[in-house]
Amino acid sequence: MEELPQEVILLFWLMGVNGAPILLAKFAGNRFNYPIDCNQLFVDGRPILGTSKTFRGLVSALLMSVVIGSVFAVPLQTSLLFGMLSMAGDMFSSFIKRRLSLLPSSMALGLDQIPESLFPLLGCQDLLAISHEQIFWIVLAFLIGELIISRVLYLLRIRKTPY
């Protein structure tokens, strides 16, 4: 069997890491659903991240990153870094959305997709030997793929919003 292109592997990895919290939330309900920001408010009086960013989601994303990384023979430290940076990008997006008074799980085109794909690709660029051009195309493919998959997950009643 022919080896998959690196861009396809990285796109699959990003989709898996970012999809794990959504799938787990659907099947776990409210179990172990504690917000990362511990329901604290920022100096502007708004939540730091909001209720949709949970420790459960963070752990599921990191575990998924390690599983996918191991399938493709990526070292454990790199797999963990990739997952952590993806979740850092996701939390960055949530932080900005709260500052813009957007509700958790509301759509902010680009802001919802770019940081969670760009942060791990840039942060692991040397470790994964990927170019800036590859990063550009993977981030673009992730943005488009996330919009399509999100709609499918909404139709399957896995996701609460259709974006």
Image: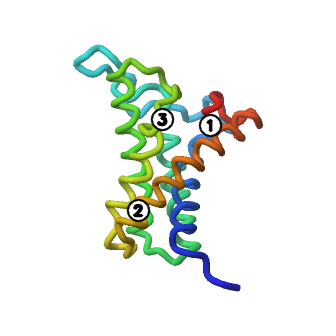
> SS at mark 2?
helix
Residue topped by disc 1: 25
Query: Nearer the observer, disc 1 or disc 2?
Result: 2
Q: Identify which residue is drawn at 39% across, 46% down.
A: 115
The image quarter containing residue 27 is top right
Q: Is residue 29 above or below residue 74?
A: above
Q: Nearer the viewer, mark 3 or mark 1?
A: 3
Question: Whole-Å distance between the Cαs marked 2 and 3?
Answer: 19 Å
Please tell me whether mark 3 sits on a helix, a strand or a loop.
loop
Q: Residue at x 49, y 48 (%)?
A: 59
Circle on res. 109: 3
Residue type at tag 1: Ala
Real-space Cα separation, disc 1 to disc 2, in angstroms? 29 Å
Is 95 left or right of 25, judged from the image as shown? Answer: left
Task: Give the x, y percent position of residue 92.
Answer: 35, 38
Task: Name the residue furthest right.
Answer: 156
How many labels, in total? 3
Disc on the earlier residue, 2 or 3 = 3
The N terminus, quarter of image: bottom right
Mark 2 closeness class: few <14, some 14–19, many ≥20 residues within 10 Å = some
Q: Secondary structure at mark 1?
A: helix
| Dot label at residue 129 | none
Q: Residue at x 58, y 46 (%)?
A: 146
First in residue order: circle 3 vs circle 1: 1
* Residue 7 x %, y %: 51, 68
Amino acid marked by disc 2: Ile
Extreme-bottom residue of the structure: 1
Q: CA distance from mark 3 to mark 1?
A: 22 Å
* Left or right: 111 in relation to 156: left
